[in-house]
Amino acid sequence: MTPDNHNNDDFDLESAFENDENIDTIFNEQNTTGIINELNNIDTPPIEDFPIIDDITADEPAGEKKRSSKDFELNMDAILLTAQSAMIIEGIKHYADKEFGPHTLPVYKEALSGIDLYIKLIDRNPGNYIKLKRIIDTDYDCQKVENTVFNLYKKIFRQLPESNQEKVVAFEKFRQLFANAVEKATISVSTKILKKYYLLSGGLDEKKIFSLIQNNNMEIKSDVNSLHQNIKTAIDMVNKGNFEIVKGLRGKDLNAYIINASHFLNFYFKNIRNEQVANYYARIYDNFKRYFITK
């Protein structure tokens, strides 16, 4: 199969970028806003200070090792590859349309799993990948995935990947886009959760929050744990200049999330008498209220 796109694909990620600088921004780790320079001086409170509820996961039976894709036979690899490729294509469509709403999170997660499968096959089991090329070259979705990945590589490096190692790099770059999409969709889900603690008028529902604290409500503790993680993710996204979650708002939605989440967390920790953590979120709130991100 030739990696060039001969099918006039209308979702080859070209529409996801206005120009080449947008690609550079996604893979750029440098600070882009003055607000982060001030936030660098804020020490993150120790995690043990939080009344954290860990996610409940089923323990694996003693002595059993979790199976990975490389443990499967070739025919299972083929089944997984074709099935996951369809999810990657759906993820590409959402990404190209800059859709990162709550409904896209499971799609991006499945797409990410599919990309990991490609990487494992090429990097850890190249023999199987070579055998599967016959399927890849005849399967519509697999073709679409490889065309998109290799064209993205060409856009970055000015040439198509040739060796297996270059193809791994291509899929790893592609993976970064979907890891980023998962973060954005997660913030969208978290924004929806945060609305439970705000009034329709836009103010914090202080009576409800205080009542939940008094009743030692487990749901609010779980939400606090989630918000604590997600607000750090959101600040990191601002740090990288990766602002837009809702198309057209240019980061205003991300800034609003950080302001509302830090305001809620400040109130919560004040009321459980944890001044250190409350002050931490008060400083984040003040910084993001002062600077309105519009890039």
Image (cartoon, rainbow, N blue to C red):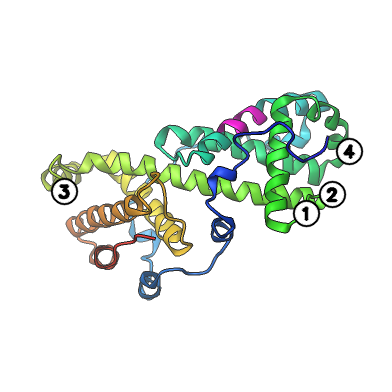
Q: Is residue 52 magenta?
A: no
Query: Which is nearer the N-term, disc 3 or disc 1?
Result: 1
- Mark 3–mark 1 Cα distance, whole angstroms, equals 53 Å
From the viewer's perspective, is the residue at label 4 or at label 2 nearer?
A: 2
Q: Which residue is mark 2?
A: 162
Write down the quadrant of residue 141 in the picture.
top right
Give, as a single range, the part of the protein colored magenta: 84-90
Q: Residue, x 75% and y 25% (percent of image)?
A: 139
- Mark 1–mark 4 Cα distance, whole angstroms, equals 24 Å
* CB under 8 Å between discs 1 and 4: no
Q: Which residue is mark 3?
A: 204
Query: Which is nearer the N-term, disc 3 or disc 4?
Result: 4
Q: Which residue is mark 4?
A: 127
Labelled disc at residue 159: 1
Q: Amino acid at mark 1?
A: Gln
Question: Relative to residue 244, is residue 110 depicted above or below?
Answer: above
In this rendering, does residue 192 appear at all? yes
- Mark 2–mark 1 Cα distance, whole angstroms, equals 9 Å
- Mark 3–mark 4 Cα distance, whole angstroms, equals 58 Å
Q: Secondary structure at mark 3?
A: loop
Q: Within 10 Å of the Cα at label 1, are there few (<14), some (14-19), or many (20+) other Cα atoms?
A: few
Relative to the observer, which residue lies in front, 228 or 64?
228
